[in-house]
Amino acid sequence: MTAATEPATATEPLVRAEGLTKRYQVRTPAGRRALTAVDRVDLTVGPGRIVAVVGESGCGKSTTGRLLLALERPTEGTVTVGGRDVNRLGKKELRLLRRDMQPVFQDPYDSLNGRMSVERILSEPARVHGVPLGGPGGARPVAELLDLVGLASSYAERHPHELSGGQRQRVAIARALALDPKFVVCDEAVSALDVSVQAQVVNLLSRLQRELGLAYLYISHDLALVRHLAHETAVMYLGRVVEQGPTKALFADPRHPYTQLLLAAVPRPRVRRDGGTEARRATVRAGELPSPLDRPPGCVFSTRCPLATDRCRTEEPALREVAGRRAACHYAETAEAVA
Ligand code: ADP
Ligand code: MG
C-alpha cells in the first residue's frame, strides 16, 4: 500500500462513497435527457473486506465500480480513499492512488491486448507506472504473478488466444495484482466463464483476498455466488441501493421486497418429503423494469412491488436501520415476505 491510501486511523474504511450520484446526458427521440445511473449511494469497503453489489442489468453496478475507481467523476457526492477525496487529488497523487485500486472486468478478451505475450501483459503495469520489476517498492515479477494465480511459468510465452477463458481471466487477475493493490473491483469477473470454471476462479479470488488481505467490490448478478463470498451485500435497483448489510442477514431475512424476489429467483435445491430435491424458481416480473430515464416517483420499486401502496407511489422510503441492516421500504419492519 502506498501512502496515498494509508487510512488516517485504524477505523477509517479503505474506500467510502457518500451520496454518490451519476447522471448522464443522453440523446433520446424526445431530445437530450438526464439519465440517472447511480442515485445517492452510500457504500464503504473496509480493508480486507468483500462487499458485493447485486441487481439486474442496468441498475448502476458498473457505474458505481467506475466511480469508486475514480475512472469517472460523480455528478454529486464523494469518493474517499484512505480519507482523501479522489476527485480532488492532483495528477501525481491520482497516479499513485491508481496503483492501489485495480479493476478485473468480465471479458478478458476485451481487457487483454491480444498482440502481447502474457509476459508483456504482466510486466506492463510496472512500465506504465515507472517502477522496477521486483525488489522493494517494485512490481511483482511475472513468475511470481503466474504462481499466485495458479499458472505454470511456461505460460509467460503464450498469447491470450492460446489460453482458455479461465486461464485468460487468471492472467487478468494477475495483472491487477502486479502493483500490490489494496482494493480490487471485480465487475462480473466470472460471468463470461463456463459454470464449471466459474467456481475455480471464484475460489482463486477468495484465496487471493485472504492471502493478500485485499478488499473487493464484487459486482455480480449471481446471488448464489455472492452468498458464500461477500461479507456485505448491497442490492441496487434503478440506481438506488434498496437494501445493504451483512450478507448473512440479507440472505436469511431479506427485508426489502426486491431482495426477497431476487433471492426467490435463485435456484436452490429443496428437500422434498420423499427425500428427493427440486429446484424452486420464482422471478421478479420480467419486462416491467422501468427505464432509468423514467424512474417512478416515490419508491423506485413501486411499479413492480406486490406490496406497493399509495404511499409507496408518492413518498420515497429512506434507507434506514432495520434488523441489523439498512433497507429502503416503508414496510421493512412489518412486511411479510412476498416470496
Ligand atoms: P449495470 O452494470 O448494473 O448493468 P450500468 O452501471 O452499466 O449498469 O448502467 C446503469 C445505467 O446507466 C444504464 O441505464 C446504462 O445504459 C446507463 N449508462 C452507463 N454508462 C453510460 C454512459 N457512459 N452514457 C450514458 N448512459 C450510461
Ligand atoms: Mg455492468
Image: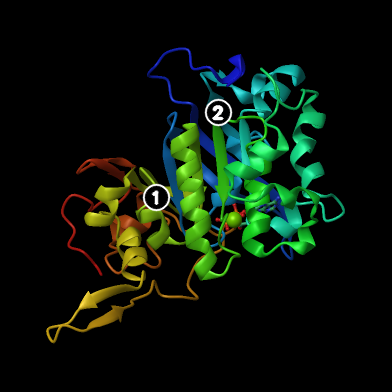
* Residue behind mark 2: 78
Q: Amino acid at mark 1?
A: Leu
Image location (x, y in percent) of residue 331: 22, 53
Badge 2 marks a residue whose secondary structure is: strand
Q: Describe residue 12's horizontal placement relative to residue 333 as left or right.
A: right
Q: Amino acid at mark 2?
A: Thr
* Residue behind mark 1: 229
Residue nearer the viewer, 298 or 252 = 252
Outermost residue toward the bottom?
274
User: Where residue 214 is drawn, which disc sits there?
Assistant: none
To which quarter of the image does residue 65 belong? top right
Quadrant of the image containing the C terminus: bottom left
Q: Earlier in the sequence, mark 1 or mark 2?
A: 2
Could you tell me if residue 238 is visible in this image? no
Q: Describe residue 83's horizontal placement relative to residue 34 as left or right.
A: left
Residue at position x 65%, y 58% from top?
Answer: 167
Q: Residues within 10 Å of mark 2 (few under 14, many from 20)?
A: many
Quadrant of the image containing the N terminus: top right
Residue at position x 66%, y 30% from top?
Answer: 179
Badge 1 marks a residue whose secondary structure is: loop
Image location (x, y in percent) of residue 187: 58, 51
Q: Residues within 10 Å of mark 1 (few under 14, many from 20)?
A: some
Residue nearer the viewer, 303 or 162 = 162
Which of the four quarters of the rendered structure image does ligand 2 lie in?
A: bottom right
Image location (x, y in percent) of residue 270: 23, 75
